[in-house]
Image (cartoon, grey):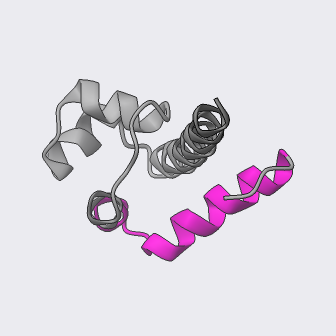
Amino acid sequence: MLRLKRNMSHMKRNQSKSRHLGVAIKQYLLERQMKQDELAGIIGVSRQTMSRILNGDTPVTYDRLAVIAAALGVRLSIIVQRAEALAAGEGEAI
């Protein structure tokens, strides 16, 4: 039972990380006046996958995040910093 609780806690932290990354990416999309369909096409994923990434429903790999950052014209570290700031604003840790 304890292992299940630990796994659930780990899953919630990962979902929180994905959610904050998704929000940060959405903010950059808005700043660049780019639609999620356009970003999906540039990085080579379906609209559904892009939607899942932006909503935090699917984890983002380092490689995919690097491609997203390049497509948005921003350093990957800047996206991560923004996601961390969003998490800190909610009292969470990334």
Q: Nearer the viewer, residue 51 or 18?
A: 18
Q: Which residues are magenta?
A: 69-90
Residue 7 is drawn in which quadrant?
top right
**Location of residue 84 with respect to 14 vertically, above or below:** below
**Location of residue 84 with respect to 21 vertically, above or below:** below
Going 38% across and 50% down the picture, which residue do you hit? 60
Going 84% across and 51% down the picture, which residue do you hit? 89
Magenta highlight on residue 37 = no
Q: Give the residue furthest to the front.
A: 1
In the picture, measured across the screen, residue 16 lies left or right of residue 67, that is: right
Going 23% across and 40% down the picture, which residue do you hit? 40
Magenta highlight on residue 87 = yes
- Residue 42, given in percent of the width and then of the height, sits at 17, 50
Quadrant location, the N terminus:
top right
- Residue 15, given in percent of the width and then of the height, sits at 55, 38
Q: Nearer the viewer, residue 86 or 62?
A: 62
In the picture, measured across the screen, residue 71 lies left or right of residue 20, that is: left
Q: Nearer the viewer, residue 10 or 45?
A: 10
Residue 37 is drawn in which quadrant?
top left
The main secondary structure of the magenta stretch is helix
Going 53% across and 64% down the picture, which residue do you hit? 79
